[in-house]
């Protein structure tokens, strides 16, 4: 949030975010090693799988971007509104599925680690790489609604975890209600 307070993310700030991502992801990986049992299976050809997955994500992202550009041009929607609500929710559908499975199997630690890793990934790597490729200028809606919501949400999650030692249904309902309120505010601002 501090890096974007002036309404832009420069290439230097993008580099700082990518560096922060590297430090944070190593810290998360090291802290999670103790949770792994001695008998972990190794995936075959992990580098090939990674490259193939990145290739598919790149193609899918390009198609999504073209489709969004057409929707924004044809229907005169706010690009900021579309990106921060509709696209984010559709992308997060897959993320929710990855969290529900371990949670239902009584592995809340794995579900929560997925959420925390995703936050680190989006804030550090994704925003950093985008700013490295092309510095970003943030509009007023991003500066005054979306960016503060993105900063407050993980802080609130951490506060709930610290206070309760986990998340229950009440906390989940609170977080879901706050998300609905955020989407309503984003739609109201974006119209």
Image: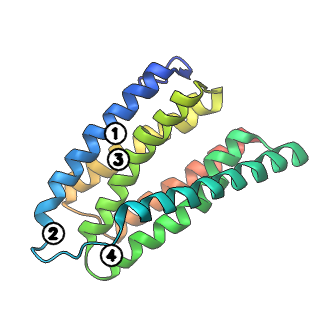
- Would residue 24 appear left or right of 51 to someone viewing this image? left
**Relative to 190, does residue 180 appear above or below in the rendering?**
below
| Residue farthest toward the top in the current orientation of the protein | 6
Which dot, 4 or 1, sits closer to the camera? Answer: 1
In the foreground, 77 or 67: 67
CA separation in Å, label 1 and label 2: 22 Å
- How crowded is the residue under tag 4: few (<14 C-alpha within 10 Å), some, or many (20+)? some
**Relative to 55, does residue 130 appear above or below in the rendering?**
above
Judging by the rendered image, the residue that carries numbered circle 2 is: 36
SS at mark 1?
A: helix
CA separation in Å, label 1 and label 3: 21 Å
In the foreground, 61 or 167: 61
Name the N-terminal-most of marks 1 and 3: 1
Name the N-terminal-most of marks 3 and 4: 4
Q: Position of residue 129 (x, y in %)?
A: 49, 35
Marker disc for residue 156 = 3
CA separation in Å, label 4 and label 1: 26 Å
The residue at 64%/58% (across/down) is: 60
- How crowded is the residue under tag 1: few (<14 C-alpha within 10 Å), some, or many (20+)? many
Which dot, 3 or 4, sits closer to the camera? Answer: 4
Q: Are marks 4 and 1 in contact (CB under 8 Å)?
A: no
CA separation in Å, label 4 and label 2: 17 Å
Q: Position of residue 56 (x, y in %)?
A: 58, 61
SS at mark 3?
A: helix
Name the N-terminal-most of marks 1 and 2: 1
Q: Are marks 1 and 3 in contact (CB under 8 Å)?
A: no
Judging by the rendered image, the residue that carries numbered circle 4 is: 103
- Would residue 178 appear left or right of 137 to someone viewing this image? left
Judging by the rendered image, the residue that carries numbered circle 1 is: 21
Which dot, 1 or 3, sits closer to the camera? Answer: 1
Name the N-terminal-most of marks 4 and 1: 1
Name the N-terminal-most of marks 4 and 2: 2
């Amino acid at each position: 949030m501090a890096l974007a307070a002036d309404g832009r993310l420069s290439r230097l700030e993008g580099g700082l975010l990518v560096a922060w991502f590297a430090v944070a992801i190593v810290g998360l990986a090291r802290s999670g090693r103790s949770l792994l049992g001695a008998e972990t299976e190794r995936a075959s050809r992990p580098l090939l799988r990674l490259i193939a997955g990145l290739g598919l994500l790149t193609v899918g992202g390009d198609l999504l971007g073209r489709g969004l550009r057409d929707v924004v041009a044809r229907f005169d929607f706010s690009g900021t509104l579309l990106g921060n609500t509709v696209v984010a929710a559709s992308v997060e559908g897959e993320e929710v599925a990855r969290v529900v499975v371990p949670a239902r199997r009584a592995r809340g630690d794995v579900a929560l680690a997925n959420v925390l890793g995703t936050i680190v990934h989006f804030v550090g790597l994704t925003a950093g790489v985008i700013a490295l490729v092309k510095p970003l200028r943030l509009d007023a809606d991003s500066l005054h609604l979306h960016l503060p919501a993105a900063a407050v949400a993980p802080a609130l999650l951490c506060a709930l975890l610290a206070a309760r030692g986990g998340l229950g249904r009440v906390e989940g309902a609170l977080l879901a209600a706050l998300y609905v309120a955020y989407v309503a505010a984003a739609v109201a601002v974006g119209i």
